[in-house]
Image (tube, rainbow, N blue to C red):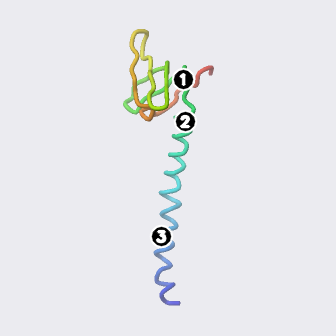
Amino acid sequence: MDSLAAFLPLILMLVVFYFLLIRPQQKRQKERMAMLDALKKGDKVITIGGLHGTIVDLNDDQVVLRVNENTKLTFERHAVNTVVQKQGE
């Protein structure tokens, strides 16, 4: 019984650690993957570098953004940080 009581605080700390750190991170990662999977042409986005643009083309790995009338830039899909406005909104 004493050995169980000695490990109880450690077990409790691991449970708290899981619910305060690991689980929220997994939730954020799942939401980010859903956001990246939902990208489509016409969405206005911000990259992780702070570049604003509109998606003009995309495939499984890359996104092409139009940043003005003459400039199109190609980024890795995971470089998209935020969707500012969905197409059609």
Residue at 52%, 52% (x, y): give it. Answer: 24
Where disc 3 sits, the SS reads helix
Q: Where residue 45 sits: x, y (%)? A: 48, 26
Residue tagged 2 = 35
Instruction: Give neighbour class at mark 2: few <14, some 14-19, many 20+ (Cα, 10 Å).
Output: some
Where disc 1 sits, the SS reads loop
Most extreme residue toward the front, as rendered? 60
Labels 1 and 2 touching (C-beta < 8 A): no
User: If you read the primary sequence from the N terminus, does the residue marked by circle 1 or circle 2 appear first?
Assistant: 2
User: If you read the primary sequence from the N terminus, does the residue marked by circle 3 or circle 2 appear first?
Assistant: 3
Residue tagged 1 = 43
Labels 3 and 1 touching (C-beta < 8 A): no
Residue at 40%, 16% (x, y): give it. Answer: 72
Establish if 7 lies above or below 54: below
Q: Which mark is residue 13?
A: 3
Where disc 2 sits, the SS reads helix
Q: CA distance from mark 3 to mark 1?
A: 43 Å
Q: Nearer the viewer, residue 62 or 39?
A: 62
Q: Nearer the viewer, residue 4 or 56?
A: 56
Most extreme residue toward the right, as rendered? 88
